Amino acid sequence: MRNTFPHLLAACTLGLLVAILSGCASSPPAKFYLLSAVTGQTVESRDVPHQGSMVVSIGPLRIPDYLDRSQIVTRSENNELKLAEFDRWAGSIENDIIRVLVEDISAQLPPDHFFVIRWTPFLDSQLPSSYRVEMSVNRFEGALDGPVTLKAQWGIFDKDKKLLFHQESVVVEQVNGNGYGAFVSAMSRAIEKLSMDVANEIKTYGGQKASLK
């Protein structure tokens, strides 16, 4: 009896180890996604603005806590939030949204008149903004089979930090296809539509400024 117990313990341990390894082997590999600029216009690549260009900075951007995570968040018909276990953001979704906003807004503005950058306190001290776009995203998700809803409040400030314009935008974009790849593509298109609204207002104020020179 004394010899049987060690063998039984070893067998149980081995069985548990095999079960764990089998479970790990059967788990699907994680997939990682990035938002992307989807505008058809060509963005001129520049490190510094043209002489006389107006600098437009994007940021800071605020997102709700429930989105600030690595998992992609979707919403069910019962308003239940779901976190994808194996479908994740390749980086920070906050940084991703700002990057795409900069690219999409750049594509909508004349490159010889506007230079669009991401706002940071340090960069603002070195390259003061003619206009700054501050944004608060209140909602950015939807059902996996669509639609995606982007709800954001945003404002345009001048170089003296005076608020020139404020608006709440709601963009609804249908998911074309199945899976998280199609879902992320719809999110990218929603950002593009929001960028068009922002760019149009910047053109208005930038055009007024140019006419006064």
Image: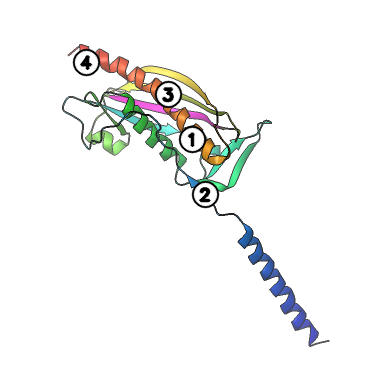
Q: Amino acid at mark 1?
A: Ser
Give the answer, above or below, for where 44 lies relative to 28: above
Q: Position of residue 43 (x, y in %)?
A: 29, 32
Between the residue at mark 1 and the residue at mark 4, the CA separation in whole angstroms equals 36 Å
The reply to whether dot 1 and dot 3 touch (C-beta < 8 Å) is: no
What residue span does the magenta drawing correspond to? 131-141
Q: Decide which of tag 4 and tag 2 comes sooner along the chain.
A: 2
Residue at image position (60%, 43%) is 83
SS under mark 2: strand
Disc on res. 31: 2
Between the residue at mark 2 and the residue at mark 3, the CA separation in whole angstroms equals 32 Å
The residue tagged 1 is: 185
For the question of whether residue 151 can be seen, the reply is yes
Q: Position of residue 181 (x, y in %)?
A: 52, 40
Q: Decide which of tag 3 and tag 4 comes sooner along the chain.
A: 3
The residue tagged 4 is: 210
Q: Where on the picture, by quarter, is residue 200?
A: top left
Q: Amino acid at mark 3?
A: Trp
Q: Nearer the viewer, mark 2 or mark 3?
A: 2
In this rendering, position of residue 184 left or right of residue 76: left
Q: Residues within 10 Å of mark 4 (few under 14, many from 20)?
A: few
Colouring mode (rainbow / by chain / secondary structure / one colour): rainbow
Q: Residue furthest right?
A: 1
Q: Nearer the viewer, mark 4 or mark 2?
A: 2
